[in-house]
Image (cartoon, grey):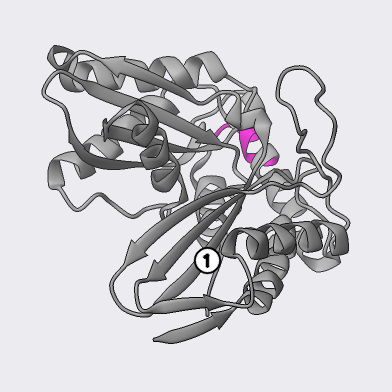
Amino acid sequence: MREIRCQDITATIAKLAQKAAVELPEDVSIALDRAIAAEDFPLAQETLKTIKHNNEIARTTCKPICQDTGMANVYITIGQEVAITGGSLKDAINKGVAQGYQDGYLRKSVVDDPLFDRKNTQDNTPALIYIDLVEGDEFKIVFAPKGFGSENMSKIKMLKPSEGVAGVRQFVEEVVTTASSNPCPPIVVGVGIGGSFDKVAYLAKQAMLRKIGSHHPDGRYAALEDELLEIVNATGIGPAGLGGKTTALGLNIETMPTHIAGLPVAVAICCHVSRHMEASL
């Protein structure tokens, strides 16, 4: 049995929170470079270059890439041979979020009651915590702060099985077209297919965090990823909604089995600042 101390979890999450706010993931940075090289509409290319320049300033000055430093999504992969010592895992995570946002001078955007009081919690907690229990003694943290300019554009639809691939295509295009410039394109799109009403949103978020340019292991879904990305970029929304062929930097699909009577589909949208950092203890 391997022991992991709560204080180490807290310290790690605090560092990830600060790093994620100021440093773009490598795959996103590479995708931006490719888009700049491929974009032939001058205004779109200049917009992409401005985005890239902003990201470099954020990295070198350790200042947030975006003023919306997001709501903390924390994904924990924990082996069943791991023992958490020195307190509660949930408390350790939330302490790390609070510490990271305080020490990094990051904007706190969480309100305690969603409908009536809406008072700021002052430390960006509670985090949204997801636990994946696996074999062995692994302990991995993925910290993904998510802003709500793009989060508000994400949608779920419970399709009928008969709607099939055509229904999925139509829904993805509808979500992106409706979002237009609101999520600060170029966007990163995650599509979840299967599961249930609640699970399909999780699948979409996981797809959104997967490396840009990677593909679903099933060739049929891999081909659909490429097709949907072409459909999204053919909308002509472009960087910042100013036109061009780079509406999305990437589109990934995650799937799981579902009920015979359903075809749940979720589309998670993120701006180009697809922030996520990970660490293993």
Q: Position of residue 237 (x, y in %)?
A: 55, 22
Q: Position of residue 106 (x, y in %)?
A: 83, 52
Prevalent SS, magenta region: helix
- Asked if residue 97 is among those painted magenta in the image, a careful observer would answer no
Quadrant of the rendered image containing residue 180: top right
Residue marked by disc 1 = 141
Quadrant of the rendered image containing residue 228: top left
Report helix, strand or loop for mark 1.
Answer: strand
Q: Position of residue 33 (x, y in %)?
A: 56, 54
* Identity, as a three-letter code, of the amino acid under mark 1: Ile
Q: Which residues are magenta?
A: 40-46
Viewer-side residue, 61 vs 97: 97
Viewer-side residue, 235 vs 36: 235
Quadrant of the rendered image containing residue 277: bottom right
Question: For this view, does 221 lie left or right of residue 125?
Answer: left
Question: For this view, does 210 lie left or right of residue 72?
Answer: left
Quarter the N terminus occupies: bottom left
Q: Is residue 175 visible?
A: yes
